[in-house]
């Protein structure tokens, strides 16, 4: 590395990779003036297919199809991984760390699932992994938790951290689009992952929540211990009932420290009060409400996906990596600092609930369900069963129960019995009704 230039190897030139190129073209000299770290120069770019038509004006001679050429090039001082996935990305990040080249990545799935191996390599080779772009696009939440709030105990992080699903839910709610129409729009806008499954099944948000939990509480988390549900099963009828009852459905991720030190960690579509600030986070925007013992509550809000916002986070990491490289010393990136911690079993977590039953309407249905809930000690705070004015004697109706706070395991067991009633036509639909700190 010369003091005047930092050589960068960029692996992946899709939406975000080309955004990084564009940002450095546009703001490179401003960044150099601000930071004094030397100019950031992309010297090699690895792509899968050289013939693919691409955005941006990166010179053809920078491109190759072999990541080893990029990682091991002597003019490359640090490596950006933006290909996603958990196999090749793992290999190339490992190779970079072993070669002592800091890594910048947006790969939340890889870090959440194979973080143990990668952070061990990072430690062994005293070479940091920077991952601001992995969580919440352009919002600097990683640095906030890692640096700005380092003197705080993090009591909770509650947020909307998947732009694609937030976009889809909003378009279904406000524009009345079908799930598939809204998903197609999100893909066209470049918000969704290459494989959008992770966006809609909740795992993209869950991976981000796992990283936030590790940053906040110091231990690495086995994804198998984390409760995750996506938005694929959210139906227009639930969106409508939520509205009638004064709520909005959001894919919410929660990282909360309990009094016994265990961590509640879950991602699922939830009812939140329509008046709550998070209910107004729309489109591709993300927001994370952070509650800490010293700084108190704060809200981080911004674009959670998309080319330029995510490139902004990658570039911030490049600058941080360059600064650290200019002053060699002990490891200053993230490393787990607790051997282990405990994740609260999902059955022990308690909230209020919305439960929708698809029933064959006959006298006594409400009484039977109510009795079973009462036998289990689960209180009912309201029922909702709108009658279709065109067909008041309909045989099949949607019956909604709003339930008082109860452990999830108790609700599950009780519903398993209720759904055996002959009047119940389908598995009940359950949403949590979240009580959030500030409404
Ligand atoms: N697909 C992700 C999202 C991109 O929609 O939030 C940012 O991680």
Image (spheres, rainbow, N blue to C red):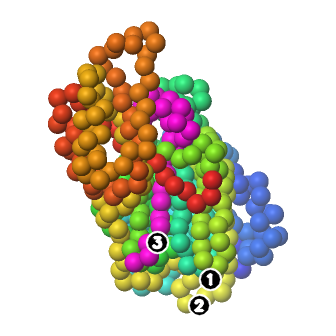
**Mark 1 vs mark 2: in front:** 1
Q: Is residue 300 visible?
A: yes
Give the image quarter of residue 199: top left
The residue located at (53%, 72%) in the rendering is 155
Counting labels gives: 3
Out of 135 and 175, give the one closest to the viewer.
Answer: 175
Give the label, 3 or 2, closer to the camera. Answer: 3
Decide if residue 385 is on the left or right side of residue 168. Answer: left
Residue situated in front as seen by the camera: 241 or 181: 241
Q: Which residue is mark 2?
A: 329
**Badge 3 is on which residue?**
257
Q: Left or right: where does residue 302 sit relative to residue 416? A: right
Q: Residue at x 38, y 59 (%)?
A: 350
The residue indicated by pointer 1 is 151
The kind of secondary structure element at disc 2 is loop
Q: Magenta includes 240?
A: yes
């Amino acid at each position: 590395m010369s003091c005047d230039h930092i050589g960068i190897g960029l692996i992946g030139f899709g939406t975000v990779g080309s955004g990084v190129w564009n940002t450095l073209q546009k703001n490179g000299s401003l960044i150099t003036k601000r930071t004094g770290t030397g100019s950031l120069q992309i010297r090699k770019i690895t792509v899968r297919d050289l013939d693919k038509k691409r955005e941006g004006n990166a010179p053809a001679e920078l491109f190759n199809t072999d990541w080893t050429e990029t990682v091991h090039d002597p003019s490359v001082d640090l490596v950006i991984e933006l290909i996603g996935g958990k196999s090749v990305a793992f290999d190339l990040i490992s190779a970079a760390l072993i070669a002592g080249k800091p890594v910048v990545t947006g790969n939340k799935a890889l870090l959440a699932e194979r973080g143990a191996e990668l952070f061990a390599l990072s430690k062994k080779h005293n070479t940091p992994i920077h991952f601001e772009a992995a969580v919440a696009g352009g919002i600097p939440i990683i640095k906030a938790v890692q640096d700005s709030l380092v003197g705080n105990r993090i009591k909770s992080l509650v947020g909307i951290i998947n732009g694609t699903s937030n976009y889809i839910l909003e378009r279904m709610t406000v524009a009345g689009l079908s799930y598939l129409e809204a998903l197609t729009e999100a893909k066209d806008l470049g918000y969704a992952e290459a494989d959008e499954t992770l966006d809609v099944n909740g795992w993209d948000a869950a991976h981000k929540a796992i990283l936030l939990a590790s940053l906040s509480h110091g231990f690495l988390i086995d994804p198998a211990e984390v409760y995750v549900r996506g938005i694929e099963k959210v139906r227009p009828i639930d969106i409508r009932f939520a509205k009638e009852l004064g709520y909005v459905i959001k894919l919410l991720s929660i990282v909360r420290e309990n009094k016994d030190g265990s961590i509640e960690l879950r991602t699922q579509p939830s009812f939140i009060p329509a008046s709550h600030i998070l209910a107004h986070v729309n489109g591709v925007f993300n927001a994370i409400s952070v509650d800490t013992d010293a700084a108190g509550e704060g809200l981080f809000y911004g674009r959670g996906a998309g080319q330029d916002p995510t490139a902004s986070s990658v570039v911030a990491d490049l600058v941080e990596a360059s600064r650290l490289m200019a002053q060699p010393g002990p490891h200053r990136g993230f490393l787990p600092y607790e051997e282990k911690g405990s994740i609260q079993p999902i059955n022990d977590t308690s909230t209020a609930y919305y439960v929708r039953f698809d029933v064959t309407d006959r006298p006594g249905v409400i009484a039977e369900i109510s009795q079973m809930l009462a036998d289990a000690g689960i209180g009912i705070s309201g029922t909702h069963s709108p009658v279709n004015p065109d067909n008041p004697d309909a045989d099949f109706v949607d019956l909604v129960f709003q339930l008082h706070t109860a452990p999830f395991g108790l609700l599950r067991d009780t519903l398993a019995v209720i759904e055996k009633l002959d009047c119940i036509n389908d598995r009940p639909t359950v949403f949590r009704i979240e009580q959030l700190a500030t409404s």
